Image (spheres, rainbow, N blue to C red):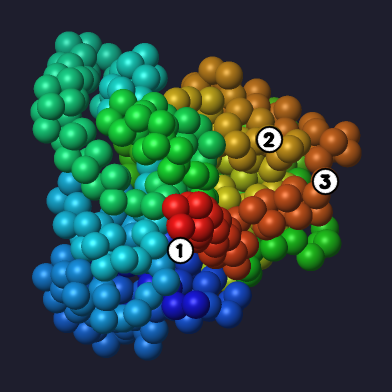
């Protein structure tokens, strides 16, 4: 078989690109014996890996260009965006099996569910208080029910119709997408929605090592709206006071606020909270493998790759329950975590204390957690799922042709 993965954005094509998303799926396909390369537009860059194809953007919109590569399938990472509809159309016109990755929690339109969609608009404005917060939210809602419903949604649907499979990263996201697809394409379009999670590198695994009473936190802490470092600080401060033995490791760029808070801690507190800053992938894998719990303070996540890496490393997961954290409802299943019922510092602290108690009581099993999630999320397993979806489509198609004959 011969498969390409493609993102129509000119990202850097170095080693980091191949640790997640379309680059990692390309490597996963290679691991199971499928000839595979990744495709991006733009000029070739010095750090680009050998298995990355750079081409002019116009070629991505050319059926002849795609046809010339004699492919069995393409996994397109284009978010269902209307501006990349012609890329999807060209691949489909070339007669290639097309799987459309949707890196989204699923609330792409009011049609996905008005109540949950409205909640998400409020969350994405940062919530807050006062007239300004409500005005920001009101502008998002107004845009969604006007430009969104009457312009963006129909063009997005036109993009999605080109896919043989519409791949959503969690069961909840798939549920939302089916509602939208049913509206725009009936049962046929809705039936194309499948759960295909983001892939995780196989370096994130559990080898039976001792699990410390340790909580791991990973994030782009400079993104205050999404990652909520202020909430992380408040929760960790309270956790240190409530639990005399727990340790916390925080990975990711150390912001001014995080640094000042850490310096304000007592000597004991500074010893128990480690600000690791930016760490390489191997160091991150070691942190997760030795930790019992992964904690996310995020307000929203389309998937949550760091949490997925933690699960494959035998960590359980704690986060807030929210319509904007759709994947985390899935992540805490199979005795692999706890969601805070109230999305505030007190609620998150309660969930963390409960999760740490479960480990102390023997109600969490690192090997079992890692076994379940590595089988679902490791790159070679996701790649095998993608190929099986192609085989299933081909079998159905063959049955239709035989019946017609």
Q: Is residue 104 above or below residue 252?
A: above
Mark-to-mark CA distance, 2 and 1: 23 Å
* In-front residue for pair 265/282: 282
Foreground disc of the pair 2, 3: 2
Foreground disc of the pair 1, 3: 1
* In-front residue for pair 59/265: 59
Residue 44 x/y as whole percent: 22, 84
Mark-to-mark CA distance, 2 and 3: 13 Å
Residue at the spot x=35%, y=79% of the render? 70
Q: Which quadrant would residue 93 be assigned to in this image?
A: bottom left
The residue to which callout 2 is attached is: 333
* In-front residue for pair 124/180: 180
Quick one: SS at disc 1?
A: loop
Mark yes or no: residue 246 visible.
yes
Residue contact between numbered discs 2 and 3, judged by CB atoms under 8 Å: no
Of label 2 and label 1, which has the lower sequence position? Answer: 1
Q: Which quadrant would residue 228 be assigned to in this image?
A: top left
Judged left or right of residue 61, residue 282 is: right
Q: Residues within 10 Å of mark 3 (few under 14, many from 20)?
A: some
Of label 2 and label 3, which has the lower sequence position? Answer: 2
Residue at the spot x=19%, y=75% of the render? 64
Residue 277 x/y as whole percent: 47, 60
Mark-to-mark CA distance, 1 and 3: 26 Å
The residue to which callout 1 is attached is: 20
Of label 1 and label 3, which has the lower sequence position? Answer: 1
Judged left or right of residue 344, residue 94 is: left
The residue to which callout 3 is attached is: 365
């Amino acid at each position: 078989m011969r498969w390409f993965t493609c993102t129509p954005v000119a990202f850097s094509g170095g080693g980091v690109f191949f640790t997640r998303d379309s680059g990692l799926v390309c490597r996963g396909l290679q691991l199971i014996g499928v000839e595979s390369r990744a495709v991006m537009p733009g000029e070739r860059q010095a750090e680009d890996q050998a298995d990355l194809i750079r081409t002019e953007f116009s070629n991505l919109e050319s059926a002849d260009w795609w046809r010339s590569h004699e492919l069995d399938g393409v996994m397109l990472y284009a978010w269902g965006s209307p501006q990349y509809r012609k890329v999807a159309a060209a691949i489909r016109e070339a007669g290639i099996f097309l799987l459309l990755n949707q890196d989204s929690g699923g609330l792409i339109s009011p049609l996905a569910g008005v109540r949950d969609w409205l909640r998400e608009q409020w969350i994405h404005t940062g919530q807050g208080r006062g007239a300004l917060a409500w005005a920001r939210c009101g502008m998002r809602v107004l845009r969604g029910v006007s430009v969104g419903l009457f312009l963006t949604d129909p063009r997005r649907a036109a993009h999605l119709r080109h896919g043989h499979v519409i791949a959503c990263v969690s069961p909840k996201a798939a549920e939302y997408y089916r509602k939208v697809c049913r509206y725009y394409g009936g049962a046929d379009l809705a039936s194309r929605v499948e759960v295909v999670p983001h892939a995780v590198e196989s370096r994130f695994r559990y080898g039976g090592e001792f699990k410390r009473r340790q909580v791991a936190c990973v994030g782009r802490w400079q993104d205050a709206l999404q990652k909520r470092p202020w909430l992380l600080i408040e929760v960790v401060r309270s956790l240190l006071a409530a639990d005399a033995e727990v340790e916390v490791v925080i990975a990711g760029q150390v912001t001014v606020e995080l640094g000042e808070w850490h310096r304000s801690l007592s000597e004991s507190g500074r010893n128990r909270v480690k600000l690791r800053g930016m760490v390489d992938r191997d160091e991150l894998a070691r942190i997760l493998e030795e930790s019992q719990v992964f904690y996310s303070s995020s307000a929203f996540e389309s998937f949550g790759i760091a949490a997925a890496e933690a699960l494959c490393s035998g960590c359980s997961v704690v986060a807030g329950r929210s319509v904007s954290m759709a994947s985390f409802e899935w992540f805490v299943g199979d005795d692999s975590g706890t969601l805070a019922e109230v999305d505030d510092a007190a609620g998150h602290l309660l969930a963390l204390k409960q999760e740490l108690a479960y480990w102390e009581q023997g109600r969490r099993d690192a090997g079992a957690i890692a076994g379940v999630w590595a089988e679902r999320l490791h790159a070679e397993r996701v790649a095998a799922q993608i190929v099986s979806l192609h085989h299933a489509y081909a079998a159905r198609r063959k049955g239709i042709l035989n019946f017609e004959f």
